[in-house]
Image (tube, rainbow, N blue to C red):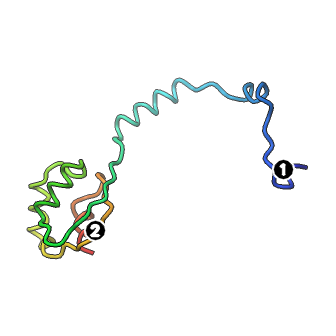
């Protein structure tokens, strides 16, 4: 009746303890392995200011662990003329983005 009226009904503490299931050790070890194989996602808000160069942006992204090689990313930006199209503003980027995705984020 209380649930039907929108109330939350909880069990007394002793009863609640009985309903908690122990962790499955096999599942727990599989989750640990998955977390090792899939490194956590790094998110960074890049603030691009007026007259900021592709070199400065690449170094900032490298420092924040978004990209591994700043020179490689800078070359990518320059070779495809993205360097000339970089916009001013704040951009949220992650370490699982490709160079292409990063370039499009920074230029649109």
Q: Position of residue 34 (x, y in %)?
A: 41, 36
Question: Distance of mark 1 from mark 2, alpha carbons?
Answer: 47 Å
Q: Residue furthest right?
A: 1
Q: Residues within 10 Å of mark 1 (few under 14, many from 20)?
A: few
Q: Would residue 74 be found to the left or right of residue 66 on screen?
A: left
Instruction: Determine the image quadrant of residue 37.
Output: top left
For the residue labelled by badge 1, is the local secondary structure a helix, a strand or a loop?
helix
Q: Would residue 31 be found to the left or right of residue 5 on screen?
A: left
Q: Residue furthest front?
A: 50
Q: Nearer the viewer, residue 82 or 7?
A: 7
Judging by the rendered image, the residue that carries numbered circle 1 is 3
For the residue labelled by badge 2, is the local secondary structure a helix, a strand or a loop?
helix
Q: Position of residue 31 (x, y in %)?
A: 46, 33
Q: Which residue is painted at 16% across and 72% down in the image?
A: 82
Q: Would residue 48 be found to the left or right of residue 32 on screen?
A: left
Q: Which residue is painted at 34% across and 41% down in the image?
A: 39
Q: Does 4 appear above or below 28?
A: below
Instruction: Determine the image quadrant of residue 36.
Output: top left
Judging by the rendered image, the residue that carries numbered circle 2 is 105
Q: Position of residue 67 (x, y in %)?
A: 21, 52
Q: Which residue is painted at 86% across and 55% down in the image?
A: 5
């Amino acid at each position: 009746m209380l649930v039907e009226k929108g109330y939350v009904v909880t069990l007394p503490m002793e009863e609640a303890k009985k309903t908690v299931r122990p962790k499955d050790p096999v599942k727990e070890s599989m989750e640990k392995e998955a977390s090792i194989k899939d490194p956590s996602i790094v998110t960074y808000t890049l603030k691009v200011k007026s007259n900021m160069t592709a070199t400065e942006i690449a170094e900032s992204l490298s420092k924040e662990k978004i990209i591994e090689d700043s020179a490689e990313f800078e070359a990518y930006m320059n070779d495809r003329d993205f360097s000339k199209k970089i916009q001013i503003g704040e951009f949220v980027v992650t370490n699982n983005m490709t160079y292409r995705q990063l370039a499009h984020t920074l230029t649109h």
